[in-house]
Structures are given as structure tokens and as C-alpha cells.
Image: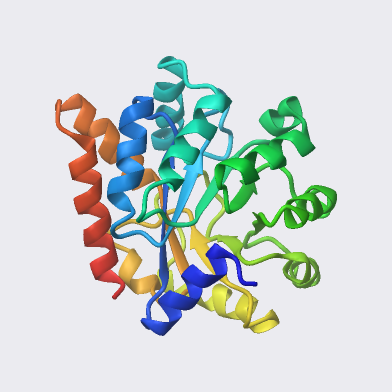
Amino acid sequence: MKSEISLAFQKCREESRPALLTYTVAGDNTKKRSLEILKSISDHADILEIGFPHNAPTADGPQIQNSSYRALKNGIKLRDVFQIVKSYKKNKNAKPSILMGYYQMVHRYGEKKFVKKCKQVGVDGLIIVDLPWPENKKFAKLCKKNSITFVQLLSPTTSKERMKKIIKDSHDMTYYISMLSTTGGKLKVSPKKILENYSKIKKINKFKNLVIGFGITKKTIASLKKADGLVIGSALCKEIADSIKKRQNPIIKLSKMVKSLKSKIQ
């Protein structure tokens, strides 16, 4: 039986376009508003990445860091993140959801307990930024046992031999970090070069879904649409920040933004 994540990619392939993956931080800027944002962008996004806020998000750029800090300032805890996902998944238009964060929270909660809770609330996948292969093999198996996709990460410095092993062990989706930077950094590599690197990775196993993340904006997204999927996060977090600053409704603004992004890759 195919997972919800696999089915989402299949649907996009049938429509001859990449999957659009969005990233927002759970609880930014309130628990209620965060849930409403997820519901609104579901009309246009294919897979939703949901970050659990962390006080030291080392892989993230300023926009996502600020998003995390806003959520933490409002008292968002891991139990709230699970509640947001659970409530979101009750929505008839809910899309596959991937929880993204750092291992410290998983370890503190307890690996088995954490994965069990994820399954209970309807999480479809997990990205643990600082748990690389092969250290993640045991945890990835635990996820698979509970029908949760563990997303492996690849970067421009990953050797071909290592890539082969990671892709062999990967589940329904692998995440290619397009450049050596934090999230939201200015694209230091041309879209052409990113796609060249991407094509080399796809040749290792053309049947595995491979998405591109880091540095993708509304200006660059169309030039990368040959990928299986594209992740956009920092631009959405910035939109939330700008809306709060201007006392506007971020729910409406984000829905329009995601709709616009999708139109660029159709």
C-alpha cells in the first residue's frame, strides 16, 4: 500500500508538474492562527512541512529562526505541535504532513514514544535535520515500522558512494539541500547548476522522489520545475512576519502566495 506522500508525488507526475512543499513553523504566531494557515495553504500545496519550534535552529536562516522564536514566545510546546497536526488532519482537504525539527526534542521525548505519537496524530513523515545517515538507520527503521516516512538529506558535498547508500535506504522521499547555507539564504548557485547536480542524483535511482530545498523563492521556483518537488519555507515565514508587522491577516496573505507559487510551476 502506497503512503500518502507517495500518492501526492504520483498525482503531481500525472499533472506533469513538481510537488509544491511548504514549510511553516507550528504555532507561529499563535496556535489557532498556525492551524488556520495550514488549512488555507492546503488548497494549493501538495505536501506540508511543519516545523517544531526550537530555541537553537542551527540549520535555519533568520526568517525561520524568527518564526521559531515567535512560536516559543507564545508558549508553544511539543504537545501543542502534535495537537495542531491532529486538528489539521481532521480537515477534509488535509494534505500529507511532514514534521521537521531537531533530534534533541525527539531524544527528550523518547524515540519510540515520539514516533508512536506522530502516528497517532497523523504525521506522514519526519525530517530530523541533525540526525544524518548512517546514525539515523535505527530511527528510520522505527519510523518505517510505524508507516512514517523518514526523509534522508543529501547535500552538494555528499560523495557519490555515500549518496548511493543513502538513496538505497531512503523511504518515499529524499531531500536535496541545494547549497551549503542556512535556509532562506540567497541562491549562491545558479538554477542550471542545481538541476545539473539534481539530474546526477536522479540517475542513481529514478524511481525515488527527490525534492529540492534551500534558497527557493518566487523568482527562482519556475526555473527548477523539472524536480520531483520543490520546498519553499523562508519566504512564507517572512510573509507571516511582514503581515504581523503591518497588522494584516497572514492567513489570507499566505494562501495567495502559495497559490501564486503553484501557478509558476504548472
208 over 37 or under it: above or below = below
116 over 14 or under it: above or below = above
Q: Quadrant of residue 78?
A: top right
Q: Quadrant of residue 66?
A: top left
Q: Position of residue 195 (x, y in %)?
A: 49, 75
Q: Residue at x 29, y 75 (%)?
A: 266
In-front residue for pair 13/237: 13
Q: Residue at x 35, y 25 (%)?
A: 30
Q: Is residue 247 left or right of 220 when viewed as pictured?
A: left
Q: Position of residue 265 (x, y in %)?
A: 31, 72
Q: Quadrant of residue 36?
A: top left
In-front residue for pair 2/187: 2
In-front residue for pair 163/254: 254
Q: Which of the image's four quarters has the N terminus?
A: bottom right
Which of the colour schemes (rainbow, by chain, secondary structure, one colour) is used?
Answer: rainbow
Q: Is residue 84 left or right of 169 when viewed as pictured?
A: left
Q: Position of residue 207 (x, y in %)?
A: 63, 81
Q: Is residue 192 left or right of 118 when viewed as pictured?
A: left
The number of discs equals: 0
In-front residue for pair 61/38: 38
Q: Residue at x 59, y 60 (%)?
A: 175
Q: Is residue 184 visible?
A: no
129 over 198 or under it: above or below = above
Q: Position of residue 170 (x, y in %)?
A: 72, 65
Q: Is residue 3 visible?
A: yes
